[in-house]
Image (cartoon, grey):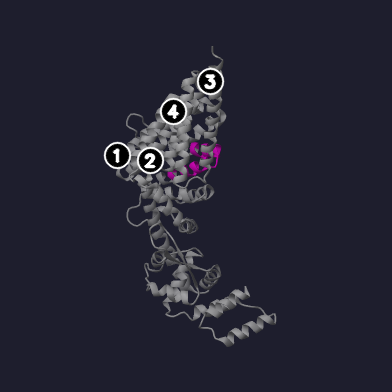
Amino acid sequence: MALKAVAVTLRDTTVDASSLYSITMQQSNGLKFSMHGFLQKCFDHLEPIDAKYMLMRLSILQAEWFDKKIANHVVVGKQPRSFDANSLTVLEAHHLLEVDHLQQVKRHKPSKLYALHSLVVKFLSSARECNAQMAQEVDIAKDNFIKYICKRTEKCGRKNYSSPNSARVNMEYNKSHVELFFRLVQSERMSLKDCFDGEKNLSRVEFVMRTADFILNHQTLIQFCQNQSETAREVCEQIYWKSRVAISHIACDKTELAYDLLSSVFNEHGVEVRETDCAVYMKPLGWTIDADPTFVVFRLVLARGKTLFHMGRNEKNQPKLSQALVDLKKAEALCDKCREFNVFKVFSKRDMSITQNAIGCVYFAMGDLTKAQGMHKKAIDSISNSIKRSSDSLNQDLIEFKSNLAACQHQLGLNTKDQTVRFRLFESALSEYNKLIDSNKRIGLDCLPPHVSLLRHRAEVYYMKVCLFVCMCVCLFFTP
């Protein structure tokens, strides 16, 4: 620690050689060395005065890398401070900022990135506790940062529907800032709706949360959604956040917890769906065909259908699979209804494919492979129609749906007695798995668990195909 402090002093021209000599002599004599004192000197000598306030605002970014664009939005807000490229240069000259270059995207020039050293962040944290003006600067910076990152995260969530692969790259690049955004929202006990400028509705919240699904782990998501459900003021918001908690429980393989939570929501709010016109009922709103209630009930019914499917499949419980099928078909009808609302139209395309794929999985678990194939093909058509850019014609959802279709072909091959038909089905499934594995590599998903599942399924099909081929050859050889 002493060496780091001396290094800061050597780089800082505002500290003279005599003070350095005095400090190093004290250190050699075993006296206490103060890193805080060195940083305080650097901070005190900052000119102009706005540089101090700017540094304090930048401290909310902690030790993460940021570019000039983010720095500008954090520094300039309701009570603006002057900001330009030279402002960061001043802090860099005092060695309070670290500088690096990062190749953000192919075919683009490397961008200059900055970061506060963790020691500097710690010093600024203690400094603002002793100064009311500095504390106010940090509060303003938090508000600026939350508004800006919320807008960027929403934009990324929108992009995910038409260009999922490019959106994924953007999410990876901004992951640390999005994580910080969710931590700040949670620590400030804010409602996510209040982070938006302009119209505040659940569709905008959903765009942000679709990005969160990619970036945050499930335990963090559960905690965040639980806090949001407690701060929610409207019944639709409360149901929305609780359904999201349930979906995260399913992802963590806690289906019993998810089912209990969903059952309590259905009972508490008396949620129902009318089959004739897809109107939804919930207390205290009554029967309605408005956008927000339709969307939240769709998510709630979809979540319960998925939960029942997982429970029925694990327990080999046919009644639960039948209940899951009923819920998922209701979800499909509600999703179709959401297409009538402009605010949810963009969701309905991808959500429809996810719902159809889930129905196909239920049919597969029930042993109805023909209907399972039909639903998986519908899901593939739905997701293919929602993708605009050719570079995104391969994406994670499409690979999952095609994998399920290949699993149907594999199972049909196992069920048939005709060896020729069986061999053809195995060959078709094997060919599909080979294409999906290659696709996963091309879009950079070959390091994720689903890729391991594809490899395992391909190995199973290949083994069955080889065994069948050997059997057919033996039969052919010994046939007179």
Residue 388 shown in magenta: no
Amino acid marked by disc 3: Met
First in residue order: circle 1 vs circle 4: 1
Q: CA distance from mark 3 to mark 4?
A: 29 Å
Give percent across and percent down for residue 477: 55, 17
Numbered disc 2: secondary structure: helix
Front one among 183 and 264 = 183
Q: Which mark is residue 372?
A: 4
Q: CA distance from mark 2 to mark 3?
A: 43 Å
Say which of marks 2 and 3 sits in front: 3
Q: CA distance from mark 2 to mark 4?
A: 19 Å
Which residue is rendered at x = 40% and y = 51% of the image? 167
Q: Which mark is residue 340?
A: 1
From this view, report whether residue 133 is shown above or below residue 444.
Answer: below
Say which of marks 3 and 4 sits in front: 3
Amino acid marked by disc 4: Ala
> What residue did someone put label 2 on?
350
Segment tinted magenta in the rendering: 239-263
